Every structure is written in C-alpha cells, then in structure tokens.
Amino acid sequence: MTDTVQTTDAGQRLRAIVGVLMMSLGPVLMAFLLSGVILLILKVNPFSYYGYVFGRGLLSPTGVQATLTRMGPLLLIAAALIVAFRAGIWNLGGDAQFLVGAVFCAAATPLMAPHVPIWLGLLAGAAISAIFGALWALVPAFLRAYQGLNEIITTLMMNFLGISLASVLVKLVFLDPATTVPQTRTLAVEDRLPTLFGTTISSGLIIGLVAILVVHFMMTRTAFGLRLRVVGGNASAAVHAGLAVPLLTIAVFAISGGLAGLSGGVAILGQYGNVRADWNPAYSLSIVPLVFLARFNGFAAIGFVGLFSILSIGAESAARRTGVPNYFTLVTIGILLVMLAVSEYYSAKRQKAGA
C-alpha cells in the first residue's frame, strides 16, 4: 500500500514538473516557430538567421563573452521585477529607473576616480545608481500606498518622464565639455569593474547572479519575503493580519527601483563608461515576459535571461549577414508574450475543467 502511494506521489510530481516545463518552454518554441514564419515571409531562411544568431551569441568565444557581460544588468532587472511581481506590484518603470541610475552614476564616477581608490569609486558609483533608481520609484510607491492609485499607470508615466529627464541631464547638466557628442564624461577603462579570468566578461555578471539569487532566497525563505507575498496575494487579509501594508508597499518599490538603478550603474561601470543623450536600451520591458515564463523563480530566470542575451548579441551579427534589423529580437519577444498569454489561458481552462 505504501509503495503504491509513493508511486502515485512520484507520478504526480513528475506530471507537475512536465506541466511546468511545457508552460515555460512551449511558448518559447512557438515564438521561434512563428518568428521563423515571419522570416520566410521576408524571404530570409530562418535556419540561416538563427544559425548566425546562436553561432555568434553562444558558439563564438567573443560572442559568449559579450553575452555573459550583457547578462549582468539584465539579471539585476529580472531581480527587480521578481521582487515587485511576487509582491503583487506592477513596477513597469524599470527603464526609467535604469537610466536615472545610469546617468547619475556616469556623472559622478569619472569625477571621483582620480581622487579615491578604484574599489571605493566603484562602490560609490554602484550605491549612487541604486539610490537614484530607488528614489525614482518612490513617487508611484507613495501614490499606491496612500492614495490607492494604480501603479501600472503611474510607473509608465514615470517611465516617460525618467527617460526624457535622463536625456536632458546628459545634454544640459552632465555634458562632457571635452566632446562634441552629447554624452557624460567617460570613466577610464582601468577604473571600471574588473573582468573575469583574463576574459572580457565584466564582473557585473557576478553582481547580477548574486542579486537574483539573494532575491530568490529572500522572497521564498525569509519572513520578510513571506510578508511581501501575503501583501501581494491579498492586501485585505494582510491588513487584518496586522501587516503595515503601506510601508511594505514602499519597501517593495524601493528595493525594485534600487535594483533597476543598480542595473544601470553596472552597465556603466562594467561596459559603457558613459551615457549618451537619447540612449535607452529598454531592457526592463523586454525582461517582463521572461520573468513570467520563469514563474518568478530566480534560477529559471537566469536561464531565460541567458537566452535573451544570446538572441540580442547574436542578432547584431545576423543583421549584418541577412539584412534583418537588430530589433527583430523584440518581435520574437513580443510573440513570446502573446504565446505566454495563450498558454496561461488554456492552463486556466484546463484547471477549471479538472475542478
């Protein structure tokens, strides 16, 4: 009897694992399939296109190093989104928080670098980016916590404002007087984050990995994370349980915005060294569907962020060889988001039928 029960439990666990994999990987496969159909319509061989993409982003030594370097800021964005979404908060202002953090970091670190040890300059630059990213998230935080305003609207509004403000700051306040191109002063290569193991991989990758694993642990294994999940699951129940919902809401926004701002700082300290006017990589909105595919799981998010990094790096090479624009990667991500919605719809329908 015991053996039968154990066999049944094992079978149920296996079916659950297979179901989760299908829910996560199914939309990815469908997105690649439909993207391939679009490429055929454009008279481009999809096998050649994705061969160039993965050949550059995954199989080329220089491409792999570029992929891993890009993962650092993206993992911090994913960590920022996981904190917010697990707490039931839609922080869609990550792009502005990223840029505001990046601009202030890029403005301050080149000025500090000649006067302080390298490690202190890097630490200060990272702290500045995180602080300003968190500050930019506080307006929608207070509006949600004390006025009950929908944070989807307020974070998107702050997104537009932040992106514009970043450009204005670069052109008017933090402009490098030594260049004709509107940009901040450039942090010298020797003053940036060190690279790993004699490669060009920025140590920002380690920062991103540590951040997303810490966030995963915090949200799943700590009392603070449990309180945030309770607030996200049922705010009314959280109030009846005696939780300080407004303060927890502000804490979520501050942590999420701080991580997004730190992402901008890591991008500057590890890769770019400066910010040019009108620069916006729009990482945050691209990572949103990947976080949902990962079911807000930090370990799974690392894999999906890695896939996105491969696509974005490889698309640059594929664009030169096939004539397909770089932003075709965003088409694939858009299709992925639609496929995710379809997958969730049919999953909910099956659960209702089973009930």
Image: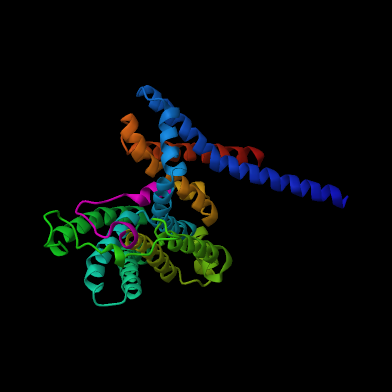
Image location (x, y in percent) of residue 69: 40, 54
Question: Splitting the image into 4 quarters, where does residue 49 fall?
Answer: top left
Q: Which residue is drawn at 88% across and 50% down?
A: 1
Question: Splitting the image into 4 quarters, where does residue 179 fall?
Answer: bottom left
Answer left or right for 158 relative to 63: left
Can residue 55 be spotted in the picture? Answer: yes
Give the residues drawn in magenta, as a range. Answer: 268-288
Q: Colour scheme used in the picture? A: rainbow
Q: Residue at x 32, y 53 (%)?
A: 153
**Is 14 part of what is drawn in magenta?**
no
Residue farthest to the right, as pictured: 1
Answer left or right for 91 relative to 215: left
165 over 287 or under it: above or below: below
The answer to which of 324 and 89 lies nearer the viewer is: 324
Question: Splitting the image into 4 quarters, where does residue 217 fall?
Answer: bottom right
**Is 271 part of what is drawn in magenta?**
yes
